[in-house]
Image: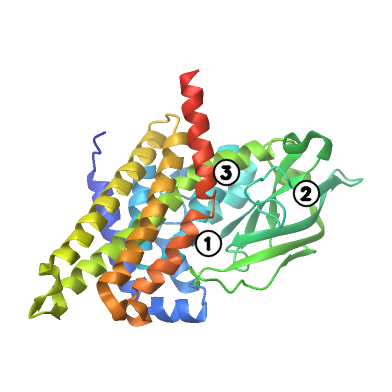
Amino acid sequence: MNFTFSDTHEMIRTTARDFARDEIAPSVIERDKNGVFPKEIVQKLGELGFLGMMVPEQWGGAGLDALSYVIAMEEISKIDASVGVIMSVNNSLVCWGLETYGNDDQKERFLRPLASGQKLGAFCLSEPEAGSDATQQHTSATQNENGDWVLNGTKNWITNGTSADTYIVFAQTNRELRHKGITCFIVDRNTPGFEPGLKEDKLGIRSSDTCSIGLTNVVVPKENILGEVGKGFYIAMESLNGGRIGIASQALGIAQGAFERSVEYAKQRKAFGKPIAELQAIQIKIAEMATKVEAARLLVYKAATMKDKHERFVKEAAQAKLLASKFAVEVALEAIQVHGGYGYVREYQVERLLRDSKITEIYEGTSEIQHIVIARELIKDLQ
C-alpha cells in the first residue's frame, strides 16, 4: 500500500512536532514524576484543533482525515504519551461517537465544545467486573416517572476521569437482553450523584488522570441517550475499533521516541575509544529497533488509510494495535539497554517511555483480545 502525504499532512506533522518540542517537552519529567495533569497544554491542543481533528468544521472540528490524526498522535506521543492518550480518548472515543450517533441537538450541545477544545470528554465503559468482557455491565439505568433515566453503578479506569466535562457512559437498561440491553448516555460532570474518585497512582502515563467514577441516582434526561436504547454495546465496539488506531499511533510514537533517543545517545557516548554507535552490538540493536518502528508505522498508516476510504478496517486496526504496542515495549526496553546505567534514571527519559509503553498492550482491548478480533475477522473472510 502506498501512502500519499499531502501538504496538509506535512503541515500537521510539523505543527505537532514543534508543539511537542516547545510546549510539552519542557515539563514532561516533572509532570510524570508528580502526576500533574497538563491542563494548559490540553487547552493549547484544543486551540490547534487537535482535540477534534476528524470532526467536520460544521461541528467545531478541524475536518481532517484519520491519517492526519495518527501523524499528530505519533509526534505528540513521541514526547509524552500522557498527552497522547488524552488526545486519543477525546478524538477517537468521545467525538467520534457523538459525530456518528448523535443527533443535531446533541452535536450542538456536546460535540461542538468538545471538538473545538472548549471542553474535554471521557469514555466510561470498563467496570470492576467488566474489562475485556464488556458485556458484563452492572451499571444500571432505569426510567423514572418523567421518562428520564436514573443511573447507578461504578466505572473503572476512566481516562480524563477527574478532568473531563462530558462523559459517554454505558449502562444496562434491560439485563435480560444482556449485551443487547446496554444503552449509551451522555452525562454532564455536574450532574448530582456523579462522583469521580481519586486519581490512580499508575506505573506510566502518569500525567494523564485515571480514576473510578461512582454513579448514585444520577438522573440523565432522555434527550441525552446517544443512538438508541439497547444499541450501546454496538456503539462501544465500533468506537473501540477506531480507538485502536489512536492507541496504535500512541505506541508508535513511544517506539519512535525511544529509537531516536537511542541513536542520539549512541552517537555521543564513547566506549573503547569510539562512539558506541560504531560497535556492532549497538548497531544490531539500532537496526532491529528501526525495523520494528517502521513495520508498526506501516500497519498504523494502513489502518488509518482504510478508515479514510470507508473500508472495513476492524482487522487492520487490531493488527496495528497488537504489533505497535508489542514493539513499543520491546524498543523501549532495548533503548534502556543502549543507554546502559543512564537508561535507568529519569533524566534520559527512556525509562519513562518503557513505563508508558506497557499500557498500550492493555487498554482499549488487551493484546489477547486483539488476537481474538483478528482471528474472527480472518475466519469470517474464509467463509
Which of pointers 3 and 2 indicates the residue nearer the eye?
3
Which of pointers 3 and 1 indicates the residue nearer the eye?
3
Mark 1 residue element:
loop
Residue that appears at 29% across and 70% down: 337
Q: How many marks?
A: 3
Residue that appears at 40% across and 53% down: 326
Residue that appears at 37% across and 50% down: 70
Tell me the distance, in whole angstroms, between the alpha carbons under discs 3 and 2. 18 Å
* Occupied quadrant, residue 15: bottom left
* Occupied quadrant, residue 235: top right
Q: Amino acid at mark 3?
A: Gly
Q: Amino acid at mark 1?
A: Gln
Mark 3 residue element:
helix
Question: In the rendering, at what x and y percent does residue 293 appear?
Answer: 29, 53
Question: In the rendering, at what x and y percent does residue 89 appear?
Answer: 52, 55
Left or right of residue 197, residue 64 in this image: left
Q: From this viewpoint, is residue 122 visible?
A: yes
Of residues 199 and 337, the one drawn nearer to the viewer in this rendering: 337
Left or right of residue 141, residue 29 in this image: left
Question: In the rendering, at what x and y percent does residue 296 appear?
Answer: 33, 48
Pointer 2 with pointer 1, Cβ within 8 A: no
Q: Amino acid at mark 2?
A: Pro
In primary-sequence order, the first of circles 3 and 1 is 3
Q: Which mark is residue 383?
A: none
Up-down: is 155 above or below 209? above
Tell me the distance, in whole angstroms, between the alpha carbons under discs 2 and 1. 23 Å
The 10 Å Cα crowd at callout 2, few under 14, some 14 to 19, many 20 or more, is some
Residue under pointer 1: 118
Taking the view exactly as shown, the residue that stands out farthest to the right is: 145
Residue under pointer 3: 97
Residue that appears at 28% across and 77% down: 340
